[in-house]
Amino acid sequence: MIRLGTGRLDRVVAVGAHCDDIAIGAGGTLLTMCLARPGIRVDALVLSGGGSDREQEEQAALAAFCPGADLRLTVLKLTDGRLPAQWDEAKAAVEELRAATEPDLVLAPRTADAHQDHRGLAQLIPTAFRDHLVLGYEIVKWDGDLGRPSAYQPLSPETAEQKVRLLQEHYPSQRHRPWYDREAFLGLARIRGIECHARYAEAFDVTKLTLDLGTFSLGE
């Protein structure tokens, strides 16, 4: 398996349709990046949950998932499950985020996600972040929509365990859900780890990737 780095990472954008999406899909990757790069700027946008207990959960959770980072979080009040009907508001929020930052990496939902809110947000991202590396994270759920990812971020056992602990600690509103447990999160991470010759990993879809093989270094 070939390993390609992104070069220097100074700014990251992370977007989610709901509070906890970013942490579930890319929490281990955020931990890995932020611990390796103190002071990295993370601009996070969540479309729903604003003004509720969910927003407070998200603020505390992302602060924990981005230790030492310059975290800037915005949580909007779009209606959960109704993104297609609120397309204009969602698009305006994504474009406003794009105008505020020039990221080296964008973490977003997969375009193949079965949830209409996740999928709609994923479709908006390339229209605003046209020349950026976008990694589409996955969220396990009853829809059975997991696919064959094309990119992997290996996670140390310590990071994988920390991700699960933080998810359980910071999102008490989700603990009643039958899929929201240690076995689900670690199980998927273990499978993705097998696929990339690691113990654990988070996996992503990459819809478009421009190579510059004259300057990139393998194994970076």
Image (tube, rainbow, N blue to C red):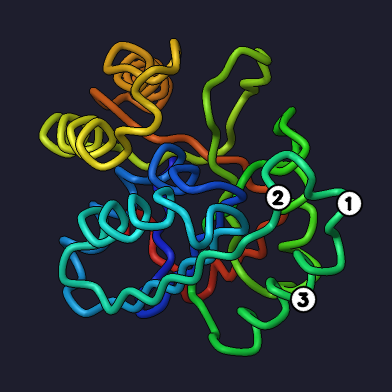
Q: Is 106 placed left or right of 143 in the picture?
A: left
Comes first in the chain, label 2 or label 1? 2
Which is nearer the eye, 119 or 11?
119
**Callout 1: SS:** helix
Q: What residue lies at 65% left-to-right and 89% top-to-bottom? A: 99
Q: What residue lies at 48% left-to-right and 74% top-to-bottom? A: 104
Residue that badge 1 annotates: 85
| Separation of marks 1 and 3 at Cα, in angstroms | 14 Å
**Callout 2: SS:** loop
**Which numbered disc covers residue 92?**
3
| Residue 106 appears anywhere in the view | no
Residue 79 pos. (x, y %): 70, 50
Residue that badge 2 annotates: 79
Residue 106 pos. (x, y %): 54, 63
Q: Nearer the viewer, mark 2 or mark 3?
A: 2
Q: Is 158 placed left or right of 8 in the picture?
A: left
Q: Amino acid at mark 3?
A: Ala
Q: Is residue 220 above or below residue 97?
A: above
| Separation of marks 2 and 3 at Cα, in angstroms | 15 Å
Q: What residue lies at 55% left-to-right and 85% top-to-bottom? A: 102
Q: Is 100 placed left or right of 217 in the picture?
A: right
Comes first in the chain, label 2 or label 3? 2
Determine the image quadrant of residue 37.
bottom left
Q: Amino acid at mark 2?
A: Thr
View extreme (bottom): residue: 100
In the picture, the quarter occupied by the C terminus is bottom left
Q: Nearer the viewer, mark 1 or mark 3?
A: 1
Residue 147 pos. (x, y %): 65, 22
